[in-house]
Amino acid sequence: MPESDRPQHTCIPRIIRCVSVIFFIMFIVQAIVGCVYIYDCPRAPSIPLFMAICGFIPVFWGLSHCKSRCSILCNCLFLIFCFAWFIFGSFLIYSNYELDYGMNTTDTNRYCNKTLYLFGFCCITLTYILIGVLVFTFFFARCTNQMEVYDDEARPLLWR
């Protein structure tokens, strides 16, 4: 491809990096919040557990790539687990939408910590939005042939 035909700059790698950084920060904070409030939601005790495990999933995936060469089957099983875990968490959080935050209640088993629940709700919603951004970015890159563009002959621009 002649030098003049190659686009010199594309915003797609920046979008992917920004979304990855947001996910990374969100997972770390999600693990911290899930661990700190592990016993503060008697109405739905699975919410803090879900958040803590969601926070540690990227760590497990990274360790699986460092310690042993994961095959395609291993990666597919891991992604299926992540998808199922995310759907489970979505159901768990969205089904308990009308929670009592323990401010005016006499029954202590019917409340959930407000910080824990609202942070989990925001994380699930933000995950849906970021996945939508990634899917849109991927299809935009495919439609505009930006996934085929190379900075040099060895590396595509999209993944640099």
Image (tube, rainbow, N blue to C red):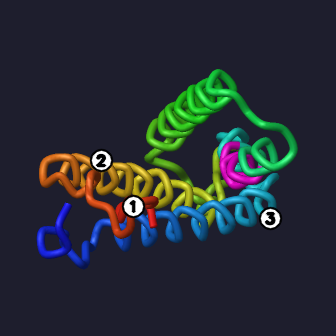
Residue 21 location in percent, x, y? Answer: 53, 70
Q: Give the residue displayed 64% in from the left and 53% down from the top.
A: 112
Residue 98 location in percent, x, y? Answer: 44, 47
Answer above or below: position of 102 versus 92: below
Q: Give the residue displayed 37% in from the left and 73% down from the top.
A: 14
Q: What stretch is highlighted in magenta?
A: 50-59
Q: Magenta segment, principal secondary structure?
A: helix
Specify whether residue 147 is painted magenta: no
Q: Which amino acid does label 1 sit on?
A: Glu
Look at mark 1 in the image and give the residue it sits on. Answer: 153
Observer-side mark, 1 or 2, equals 1
Q: Please indicate whether residue 74 sits to the left or right of residue 23 in the image.
A: right
Look at mark 2 in the image and give the residue it sits on. Answer: 135
Residue 26 in which image quadrant:
bottom right
Judge by depth and name the residue closer to the eye, 27 or 156. 156
Which label sits on residue 24? Answer: none
Q: Give the residue displayed 69% in from the left and 55% down from the top.
A: 55
Q: Please indicate whether residue 18 sits to the left or right of residue 116 in the image.
A: left
- Give the mark nearest the N terminus, 3 or 2: 3
Judge by depth and name the residue closer to the eye, 100 or 20. 20
- Give the mark nearest the N terminus, 1 or 3: 3
- Give the mark nearest the N terminus, 1 or 2: 2
Residue 12 in which image quadrant:
bottom left
Label 1 CA crowd tier, 10 Å (few <14, some 14–19, many 20+): few
The residue furthest front is 2
Judge by depth and name the residue closer to the eye, 143 or 105. 143
Residue 54 location in percent, x, y? Answer: 66, 48
CB atoms at circles 1 and 2 under 8 Å apart?
no
Image quadrant for the N terminus? Answer: bottom left
Q: Which amino acid does label 3 sit on?
A: Val
Q: Which amino acid does label 2 sit on?
A: Val
